Image (cartoon, coloured by chain):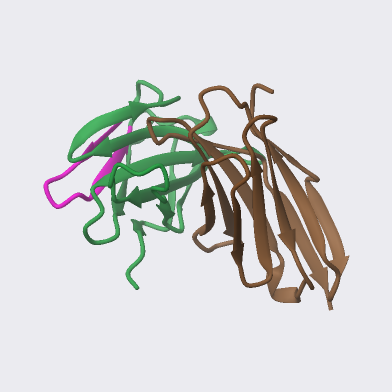
Chain colours: A green, B brown
Amino acid sequence: AAGVIQSPRHLIKEKRETATLKCYPIPRHDTVYWYQQGPGQDPQFLISFYEKMQSDKGSIPDRFSAQQFSDYHSELNMSSLELGDSALYFCASSLDVGSSYNEQFFGPGTRLTVL
Amino acid sequence: ILNVEQSPQSLHVQEGDSTNFTCSFPSSNFYALHWYRWETAKSPEALFVMTLNGDEKKKGRISATLNTKEGYSYLYIKGSQPEDSATYLCASRNAGNMLTFGGGTRLMVKP
Protein backbone atom coordinates (compact mmCIF):
# COMPACT_ATOMS: atom_id res chain seq x y z
CA ALA A 1 0.00 0.00 0.00
CA ALA A 2 1.16 3.52 -0.75
CA GLY A 3 2.59 5.39 2.20
CA VAL A 4 3.44 8.98 2.99
CA ILE A 5 6.47 10.10 1.01
CA GLN A 6 8.85 12.75 2.21
CA SER A 7 11.70 14.30 0.34
CA PRO A 8 14.51 14.73 0.73
CA ARG A 9 15.28 12.14 3.39
CA HIS A 10 18.40 13.98 4.47
CA LEU A 11 19.33 17.62 4.06
CA ILE A 12 22.37 19.55 5.16
CA LYS A 13 22.28 23.34 5.17
CA GLU A 14 24.36 26.22 6.46
CA LYS A 15 23.09 28.77 8.97
CA ARG A 16 20.93 31.48 7.41
CA GLU A 17 20.17 29.35 4.36
CA THR A 18 16.72 28.29 3.24
CA ALA A 19 15.30 24.77 3.09
CA THR A 20 12.17 23.29 1.54
CA LEU A 21 10.78 19.98 2.72
CA LYS A 22 8.15 18.14 0.72
CA CYS A 23 5.44 15.75 1.77
CA TYR A 24 3.27 13.60 -0.49
CA PRO A 25 0.29 12.19 1.42
CA ILE A 26 -1.31 8.84 0.94
CA PRO A 27 -3.60 9.01 -2.13
CA ARG A 28 -7.04 10.45 -1.30
CA HIS A 29 -5.89 11.78 2.06
CA ASP A 30 -6.93 15.40 2.41
CA THR A 31 -5.16 16.41 5.61
CA VAL A 32 -1.45 16.89 6.16
CA TYR A 33 0.41 17.47 9.43
CA TRP A 34 3.99 18.54 10.10
CA TYR A 35 5.92 17.58 13.26
CA GLN A 36 9.43 18.46 14.40
CA GLN A 37 11.51 16.18 16.60
CA GLY A 38 14.69 17.71 17.94
CA PRO A 39 17.52 15.57 19.33
CA GLY A 40 16.34 13.81 22.47
CA GLN A 41 12.94 15.52 22.31
CA ASP A 42 9.34 14.46 21.74
CA PRO A 43 7.86 15.15 18.32
CA GLN A 44 6.20 18.58 18.40
CA PHE A 45 3.29 19.57 16.23
CA LEU A 46 4.05 22.44 13.84
CA ILE A 47 1.10 22.95 11.52
CA SER A 48 -1.64 21.13 9.64
CA PHE A 49 -3.70 21.64 6.50
CA TYR A 50 -7.11 20.37 5.49
CA GLU A 51 -8.27 20.77 1.91
CA LYS A 52 -5.44 23.24 1.22
CA MET A 53 -6.38 25.50 4.13
CA GLN A 54 -4.41 25.79 7.34
CA SER A 55 -6.38 24.00 10.04
CA ASP A 56 -4.18 24.05 13.14
CA LYS A 57 -1.02 25.82 14.14
CA GLY A 58 1.38 24.70 16.81
CA SER A 59 4.86 25.79 17.77
CA ILE A 60 5.97 26.81 14.30
CA PRO A 61 8.51 29.65 14.16
CA ASP A 62 7.68 32.73 12.09
CA ARG A 63 10.67 31.88 9.88
CA PHE A 64 8.81 28.78 8.73
CA SER A 65 5.88 28.71 6.37
CA ALA A 66 3.94 25.88 4.81
CA GLN A 67 1.22 25.27 2.32
CA GLN A 68 -0.81 22.49 0.81
CA PHE A 69 -1.22 22.39 -2.94
CA SER A 70 -4.09 21.37 -5.19
CA ASP A 71 -2.71 17.82 -5.47
CA TYR A 72 -2.65 17.72 -1.62
CA HIS A 73 1.09 17.57 -1.34
CA SER A 74 2.58 19.97 1.18
CA GLU A 75 5.80 21.93 1.45
CA LEU A 76 7.45 23.28 4.58
CA ASN A 77 9.64 26.28 3.83
CA MET A 78 12.26 27.21 6.38
CA SER A 79 14.24 30.43 6.07
CA SER A 80 17.15 31.96 7.99
CA LEU A 81 18.02 28.53 9.31
CA GLU A 82 19.47 28.29 12.79
CA LEU A 83 21.48 25.54 14.43
CA GLY A 84 18.46 24.74 16.60
CA ASP A 85 16.42 23.87 13.53
CA SER A 86 18.41 20.66 13.17
CA ALA A 87 15.80 17.99 13.70
CA LEU A 88 13.79 15.19 12.18
CA TYR A 89 10.75 16.61 10.41
CA PHE A 90 7.83 14.24 10.09
CA CYS A 91 4.86 14.62 7.84
CA ALA A 92 1.64 12.70 8.44
CA SER A 93 -1.56 12.45 6.45
CA SER A 94 -5.10 11.41 7.20
CA LEU A 95 -8.50 11.25 5.58
CA ASP A 96 -10.88 13.47 7.48
CA VAL A 97 -14.05 11.43 7.73
CA GLY A 98 -15.29 13.31 10.74
CA SER A 99 -14.56 10.36 12.99
CA SER A 100 -12.70 10.43 16.25
CA TYR A 101 -10.89 7.32 14.98
CA ASN A 102 -9.13 9.32 12.24
CA GLU A 103 -5.69 7.81 11.97
CA GLN A 104 -2.59 9.79 11.07
CA PHE A 105 -0.10 7.92 8.93
CA PHE A 106 3.47 9.08 9.14
CA GLY A 107 6.21 9.41 6.57
CA PRO A 108 9.81 8.37 7.32
CA GLY A 109 10.86 11.92 8.08
CA THR A 110 13.42 14.35 6.69
CA ARG A 111 16.52 14.76 8.78
CA LEU A 112 17.70 18.35 8.56
CA THR A 113 21.16 19.24 9.77
CA VAL A 114 22.12 22.89 10.02
CA LEU A 115 25.85 23.56 10.21
CA ILE B 1 -0.95 15.89 34.25
CA LEU B 2 -0.07 18.63 31.78
CA ASN B 3 1.88 16.66 29.21
CA VAL B 4 1.83 13.22 27.71
CA GLU B 5 4.24 11.04 29.64
CA GLN B 6 5.41 7.53 29.00
CA SER B 7 7.10 5.10 31.32
CA PRO B 8 9.48 3.48 31.44
CA GLN B 9 11.78 5.33 29.04
CA SER B 10 13.47 2.08 28.11
CA LEU B 11 12.94 -1.56 28.78
CA HIS B 12 15.06 -4.67 28.22
CA VAL B 13 13.27 -8.03 28.23
CA GLN B 14 14.09 -11.57 27.22
CA GLU B 15 12.45 -13.23 24.26
CA GLY B 16 9.21 -14.82 25.41
CA ASP B 17 8.61 -12.38 28.27
CA SER B 18 5.40 -10.42 28.37
CA THR B 19 5.67 -6.74 29.07
CA ASN B 20 3.64 -3.59 29.39
CA PHE B 21 4.20 0.14 29.53
CA THR B 22 2.20 3.20 30.40
CA CYS B 23 1.08 6.39 28.74
CA SER B 24 -0.36 9.17 30.90
CA PHE B 25 -2.19 12.09 29.37
CA PRO B 26 -4.30 15.08 30.43
CA SER B 27 -7.89 13.90 30.71
CA SER B 28 -9.27 17.38 29.94
CA ASN B 29 -9.87 18.19 26.24
CA PHE B 30 -9.12 14.57 25.43
CA TYR B 31 -10.34 13.31 22.09
CA ALA B 32 -8.35 10.21 21.19
CA LEU B 33 -5.25 8.28 22.15
CA HIS B 34 -2.89 6.90 19.50
CA TRP B 35 -0.17 4.28 19.83
CA TYR B 36 2.65 4.04 17.27
CA ARG B 37 5.49 1.61 16.83
CA TRP B 38 8.64 3.26 15.51
CA GLU B 39 11.76 1.58 14.26
CA THR B 40 14.76 3.78 13.55
CA ALA B 41 14.92 5.12 9.99
CA LYS B 42 11.38 3.94 9.28
CA SER B 43 7.98 5.60 9.45
CA PRO B 44 6.13 5.37 12.76
CA GLU B 45 3.61 2.57 12.28
CA ALA B 46 0.09 3.17 13.55
CA LEU B 47 -0.96 0.52 16.07
CA PHE B 48 -4.18 1.69 17.72
CA VAL B 49 -6.55 4.62 18.04
CA MET B 50 -8.81 4.62 21.08
CA THR B 51 -11.39 7.16 22.15
CA LEU B 52 -13.79 5.69 24.68
CA ASN B 53 -13.16 5.00 28.32
CA GLY B 54 -12.63 1.27 28.69
CA ASP B 55 -11.65 0.79 25.04
CA GLU B 56 -9.50 -2.26 24.47
CA LYS B 57 -7.78 -2.96 21.17
CA LYS B 58 -5.74 -5.95 20.07
CA LYS B 59 -3.46 -6.67 17.13
CA GLY B 60 -1.76 -10.04 17.29
CA ARG B 61 0.32 -10.20 20.46
CA ILE B 62 -0.07 -6.48 21.15
CA SER B 63 -3.04 -5.01 22.99
CA ALA B 64 -3.91 -1.69 24.58
CA THR B 65 -6.41 -0.35 27.08
CA LEU B 66 -7.68 3.14 27.75
CA ASN B 67 -8.86 4.92 30.89
CA THR B 68 -9.96 8.44 29.98
CA LYS B 69 -11.21 9.32 33.47
CA GLU B 70 -7.83 8.91 35.08
CA GLY B 71 -5.85 9.69 31.92
CA TYR B 72 -3.80 6.61 31.17
CA SER B 73 -3.36 3.88 28.61
CA TYR B 74 -1.45 0.62 28.85
CA LEU B 75 0.22 -1.19 25.98
CA TYR B 76 0.80 -4.91 26.47
CA ILE B 77 3.04 -7.21 24.46
CA LYS B 78 2.59 -10.92 25.05
CA GLY B 79 5.52 -13.25 24.42
CA SER B 80 7.97 -10.57 23.22
CA GLN B 81 10.01 -11.34 20.13
CA PRO B 82 13.23 -9.67 18.95
CA GLU B 83 11.30 -8.10 16.07
CA ASP B 84 9.18 -6.25 18.65
CA SER B 85 12.24 -4.16 19.49
CA ALA B 86 11.30 -0.59 18.69
CA THR B 87 10.23 2.66 20.29
CA TYR B 88 6.55 2.73 21.21
CA LEU B 89 5.06 6.21 21.07
CA CYS B 90 1.73 7.30 22.43
CA ALA B 91 0.05 10.54 21.47
CA SER B 92 -3.02 12.31 22.74
CA ARG B 93 -5.17 14.00 20.13
CA ASN B 94 -7.36 17.05 20.63
CA ALA B 95 -10.50 17.88 18.69
CA GLY B 96 -8.38 19.74 16.15
CA ASN B 97 -6.46 16.56 15.27
CA MET B 98 -3.21 17.84 16.74
CA LEU B 99 -1.17 15.03 18.29
CA THR B 100 0.82 15.63 21.47
CA PHE B 101 3.43 12.93 21.82
CA GLY B 102 5.00 11.32 24.81
CA GLY B 103 8.70 10.62 24.93
CA GLY B 104 8.30 7.01 23.93
CA THR B 105 9.33 3.74 25.49
CA ARG B 106 12.31 2.07 23.86
CA LEU B 107 11.85 -1.70 24.01
CA MET B 108 14.74 -4.08 23.41
CA VAL B 109 14.00 -7.79 23.28
CA LYS B 110 17.00 -10.07 23.69
CA PRO B 111 17.00 -13.43 21.92
Query: Residue A80 vs residue A51: left or right?
Result: right
Between A8 and B37, the residue placed more toward the observer is B37
Q: Quadrant of residue A28?
A: bottom left
Q: Position of residue A105 (x, y in %)?
A: 41, 55
Between B68 and A85, the residue placed more toward the observer is B68
Query: Residue A113 vs residue B22: left or right?
Result: left
Q: Position of residue B66 (x, y in %)?
A: 64, 44
Q: Is residue A82 above or below residue A109?
A: above
Q: Is residue A50 above or below residue B43?
A: above
Q: Position of residue A94 (x, y in %)?
A: 33, 50
Tell me the quarter of the image containing the N terminus of chain B. top right
Between A71 and B100, the residue placed more toward the observer is B100
Q: Is residue A47 above or below residue A94?
A: above
Query: Residue A114 vs residue A6: left or right?
Result: right
The segment highlighted magenta reads A64-78
Q: What residue is drawn where x is 42% and y is 57%?
A: A107
For the stretch drawn in magenta, what is the main secondary structure? strand
Q: Quadrant of residue B39?
A: bottom right
Q: Position of residue A65 (x, y in %)?
A: 29, 30
Q: Is residue A64 visible?
A: no
Tell me the quarter of the image containing the C terminus of chain B. bottom right
Q: Is residue B23 above or below residue B80?
A: above
Q: Residue furthest front?
A: B54
Q: Residue furthest bottom?
A: B111
Between B86 and B66, the residue placed more toward the observer is B66
- Is B49 in the magenta? no
Q: What residue is drawn where x is 66% and y is 60%?
A: B63
Query: Residue A85 vs residue A32: left or right?
Result: right
Q: Is residue A23 visible?
A: yes
Q: Quadrant of residue A1?
A: bottom left
Q: What residue is drawn where x is 29% and y is 60%?
A: A26
